[in-house]
Image (spheres, rainbow, N blue to C red):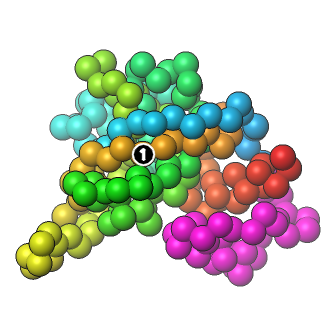
Amino acid sequence: MNIATIALTGFFVWSGIAAPAFVPAGDSVKPILKAPEANLSVKLTAYNAVPEQTDSDPFTTASGAYSNPEVIAARSRDLAAELPFGTVIAIEAPEKSHSCGFKTVEHLIGYRVIADTMHERMHNKIDVLFDPGDVVEIGVNGEPKKLVNPARALGICSVTARVVGKIDVKDIPTTQSELAMRVERTLAQK
């Protein structure tokens, strides 16, 4: 894969523009598996891979995958049938976001792979994993902007989670660019 392909994919993923469904000839990027299409209305929150927010091993998800903040998401247990481990989702922004910071962190979300689960008290929720070292700027009602962790900036949002495919949890890409290329290749084959 050449540098231009990586750069273009990153641009499309982070800008929110639909990337063209192309893969250079001879590229070895394999598509993800197709999955039954589904759109779920859920609450979206975020977490960090730290013991206070996970368990004593924050670097391993419930599926056994590495807790990679670029691509991992957790789901509440009541969504296990609709979103089994390995499900690849696209999270679509809420139409109105009065108390939701989705727009502030949207560039960090991209596609996500369901590889973790939430506490049993949670229902109808998806939790995206963010890097605990990341920060975003927020400011409310003309207040000065301050730097906060993206999980805090996001808050709780009502979103649509669109199922776009399935992947083996042992084969989860390590970057958003690679995951996006695999998703786009799968969508191009439909």
Q: Amino acid at mark 1?
A: Val
**Residue 83 x %, y %:** 54, 28
**Residue 140 x %, y %:** 14, 69
User: In the rendered structure, which segment of residues is drawn in magenta?
Assistant: 1-30
Query: Horizontal placement of 82 versus 108: left or right?
Result: right
Residue 174 seen by the camera: yes
Residue shown at the point (56%, 59%) measured from the top left: 176
Residue position marked by numbered label 1 in the rendering: 159
Viewer-proximal residue among 56 and 23: 23
Quarter in which the N terminus is drawn: bottom right
Question: Which secondary structure lies at badge 1?
Answer: strand
Farthest right residue in view: 25
**Residue 186 x %, y %:** 78, 49
Residue shown at the point (30%, 18%) measured from the top left: 120
Q: Which image quarter: residue 180?
A: bottom right
Q: Is residue 2 magenta?
A: yes
Q: Is residue 120 magenta?
A: no
**Rendered view: 168 above or below 96:** above
Residue shown at the point (57%, 37%) measured from the top left: 39
**Residue 104 x %, y %:** 32, 66
Residue 170 seen by the camera: no
**Rendered view: 43 above or below 185:** above
Query: Horizontal placement of 157 versus 87: left or right?
Result: left
Q: Which image quarter: residue 109?
A: bottom left
Query: Horizontal placement of 72 versus 130: left or right?
Result: right
Query: Horizontal placement of 8 versus 65: left or right?
Result: right
Farthest left residue in view: 143
